[in-house]
Amino acid sequence: MKQFLKNTIRFLVVLYGSILVLMVFSNYVINANADFKLQPNINKVVLGNSHPAGTFNDSLISNLKNLADPGDCYFYGYQKLKEIIKQNSQIDTVFIEFNPKTILSWEDT
């Protein structure tokens, strides 16, 4: 019984230790490589899922950058927006696509 408990504890320590190392490493890599710095003339950004990604052509609209991604949800858009605002003080307008369907609880599954 002692051997079983030792092996179980050892396994759990290695498992959770590995998960922790992977999480710390992936956060470091993402933060080190995430560059949301925009050109100085860009003061408007568009965030959302596939609808604004295909609707707003930032090459035709002056001072606008379309950062919408197909399949993007509000949580990731919010995280992206925090970094964008932190790295670009000139941003004064943010357009966020809203669709009531995307906030339904069954969409989270």
Image (cartoon, rainbow, N blue to C red):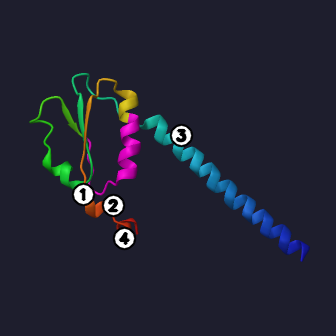
Report the amino acid beneath label 4.
Trp
- Disc 3/disc 1 C-alpha distance (Å): 33 Å
**What's the mark number on residue 103?**
2
The picture places residue 67, in percent across and down from the top left corner, at 26, 42
**Other residues around mark 3 within 10 Å, as few (<14) / some (14–19) / many (≥20):** few
Quadrant, the C terminus: bottom left
The location of residue 76, given as percent across then percent down, is 39, 49
Q: Label 4 belongs to which residue?
A: 106
Q: Secondary structure at mark 2?
A: helix
Amino acid identity at mark 1: Asn
Closer mark to the observer between disc 3 and disc 2: 2
Q: Would you say the residues marked 2 and 4 are in contact, meaning their CB atoms lie under 8 Å apart?
A: no
Q: CA distance from mark 3 to mark 2?
A: 30 Å
Measuring 24% from the left and 36% from the top, which residue is drawn there? 45
Which is more toward the observer, 67 or 94? 94
Residue interval drawn in magenta: 67-83
Mark sitting on residue 28: 3
User: Which comes sooner in the sequence, label 4 or label 1?
Assistant: 1
Residue drawn 19% across the image and 54% down it: 51
Nearest to N terminus: mark 3 or mark 4:
3
